[in-house]
Image: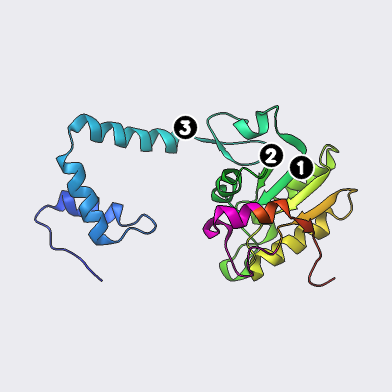
Amino acid sequence: MYRSNLSSSLLQDAVDELSSLPGIGRKSALRFALHLLKQPSENVERFSKSILKMRKEIKYCKNCNMISDSDICPICSSSSRERSLVCVVESIRDVISIDNTGQYNGLFHVLGGIISPMDGTGPSDLSIDHLVSRVAGGSVKEVFLALSTTMEGETTAYYIFKKLNQFDIKISTIARGVGFGDDLEYTDEVTLGRSIQNRQPFVPLSK
């Protein structure tokens, strides 16, 4: 592993923290730290304050679990959204990816992960019960399962299908333009958009 010998413990601490971010190696972390050192103090303070403010003040929407500045996110509070359609996703990043396609105009529900026994994540660790409560309210007519097409994603989709099958609603899933084993986060917007437009009824792999 690359580890530079720095003359300053303060710089070393900054590099250590920056390199803990996803996708940031120590060389990149050192470059970022040196860049910050060259900036005016007020710029660095503004940068630092924005991160701290985000961490301390950001909220999660009470309806869908999306990040928000208020208790209800802009998507859920929008009058132009199709409120009878709810897209179920694994993460906040998936909401952003799907919304960026411009092909979806319903609401969302962020699970906060997928069922993965290997990682110690079970149904009770996800917001599945919250989703069931939303559907039980009667205003939802279609639940669109837009989960990663991995084995864990399929398992989660099947579990949700069983929980929601008691309700008189349509349960659909992304078309297979997204290949099996793909994460939505890394799927291009054109392919993802077409998969949303051509969504199909959810058919469990096993019953």
Instruction: Estimate how packed mark 1 is, as few (under 14), some (14 to 19) or many (20 or more) residues with alpha carbons within 10 Å.
Output: many
Report if residue 54 lies within the magenta region: no
Report if residue 188 lies within the magenta region: yes
- Element under disc 3: helix
Question: Mark 3 highlights which residue?
Answer: 57
- The reply to whether residue 130 is in sight is no
163, above or below 1, in the image? above
Q: Position of residue 122 (x, y in %)?
A: 66, 62
Question: Which is more N-terminal, label 1 or label 3?
Answer: 3
Indicate left or right for 1 with 83 as reference.
Answer: left
Task: Write the residue at 69% across / 58% down.
Answer: 123
Task: Write the residue at 20% across / 66% down.
Answer: 3
- Element under disc 1: strand
Q: Which mark is residue 105?
A: 2
Amino acid carrying mark 3 in the image? Glu
Amino acid carrying mark 1 in the image? Leu
- Foreground pick, 22 / 8: 22
Instruction: Estimate how packed mark 3 is, as few (under 14), some (14 to 19) or many (20 or more) residues with alpha carbons within 10 Å.
Output: few
- Magenta stretch in the rendered image: 176-193
Which of labels 2 and 3 is toward the front?
2
Indicate left or right for 167 with 116 as reference.
Answer: right
Which quadrant does the N terminus fall into? bottom left
Question: Mark 1 highlights which residue?
Answer: 85
Q: Position of residue 154 (x, y in %)?
A: 70, 66
